[in-house]
Image (spheres, helix red, strand yellow):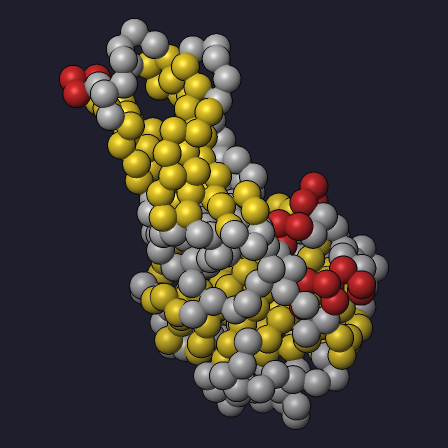
Amino acid sequence: MARTFNGTTQRLAYAAAIASRPFTIAAWFNLTSLTVTAEIFSILDNTQNPGLDGYALDVSGTEGGDPIRAWYQTNGGATVGYAKTTAGPAANTWTHGCGVFAAGSTAAYINGGNKGNAGTNTATAPNSTNLGARFYGGAWSGFFPGRLAEAAIWDVALADAEVVILAKGMSPLLMRPQSLVAYWPLIGRTSPEIELINGYGMTLVNAPTVGDHPPVLYPPRALFSHVVATPSTTTVQLDWTDVSENEDGFSIERATDAGAFAEIDTVGAGVVTYDDLLVPTGHTYHYRVRATSATLGYSDYSNEADVVV
């Protein structure tokens, strides 16, 4: 699933996930209106007034062709610049947007192409990362009308060919994973909205809702949330967060003390809890989960969750 924004009050917010160039930001978006300037991503100082100090990726409904812009403003707006694509999106259509903020240049992309270039400058002190709005002139503005999904930040400047691959639908998890700083699938099922790399959960401001997700290619994946033991009933309750959109089910494995892991059960797609019943006491148990797909095979394993019964 994706997050749906009303275009007037809603956004997602976290502290600064990255502070300076080089970096890349990208997301899938689906606009319901092309008549407004709609912020996709903003990384900025949310105390700056007047002006703005930071970076952003937006769709400009006030310029001919409705380009995607990767822009920067520094020192309260004293230095302003932006790259803009040579084409714009269509309304009510999933589109990929990307901004590459290299050490000496700025670039904007739509669906991996129509690249626009600009110069460079470095913001002074970004302190917030936002999806769906920006802070400008002492107030939040540029609210996004529509859906956002698959938002990601890398601490490198991705190459043109890599942006093309992302725009074809590859998951950010599979693109330079060693440089991936933050990744919000925006599955729309949790509050805060989960982030899979460093735990940068985003706060839901004015409750953006759930919407349909774009078609993205990634292996099914499972992420553990927590494990709780209930010794009085010799039951171990497992809970995890389903971040995949294409699993057929989940495989649950257990190891006892220093023994090997073995599958103990499977559950269906969308199931996010499991009770391991009548567990013998006096042992340490280790659990892990992975998603399964008839066409894609197994996902990576979740982390191992340990419990003493």
Percent from the top left, x then y, of residue 222?
Answer: 47, 42
Q: Is residue 88 above or below residue 270?
A: below
Point out the residue furthest to the right here.
Answer: 104
Point out the residue furthest to the left here.
Answer: 232
Point out the residue furthest to the bottom here.
Answer: 64
Question: How many discs mark residues in the rendered view?
Answer: 0
Name the foreground residue: 29 vs 134.
29
Residue 281 in the figure: left or right of residue 297: left
At x 48%, y 44%, the residue is: 291
Specify the quadrant that holds the N terminus.
Answer: bottom left
Q: Is residue 223 above or below residue 187?
A: above
Percent from the top left, x then y, of residue 139?
Answer: 43, 69
Q: Is residue 267 visible?
A: yes
Name the foreground residue: 50 vs 36.
36
At x 71%, y 78%, the residue is: 84
Residue 11 in the figure: left or right of residue 37: left
At x 59%, y 75%, the residue is: 95
Specify the quadrant that holds the C terminus.
Answer: top left
At x 38%, y 51%, the residue is: 269
Q: Is residue 70 visible?
A: no
Name the foreground residue: 14 vs 196.
196
Residue 147 in the figure: left or right of residue 83: left
Percent from the top left, x then y, of residue 77?
Answer: 63, 68
Q: Is residue 168 above or below residue 302?
A: below
Image quadrant of residue 283? Answer: top left
Point out the residue furthest to the front here.
Answer: 294
Name the foreground residue: 19 vs 259.
259
Percent from the top left, x then y, of residue 66?
Answer: 62, 86
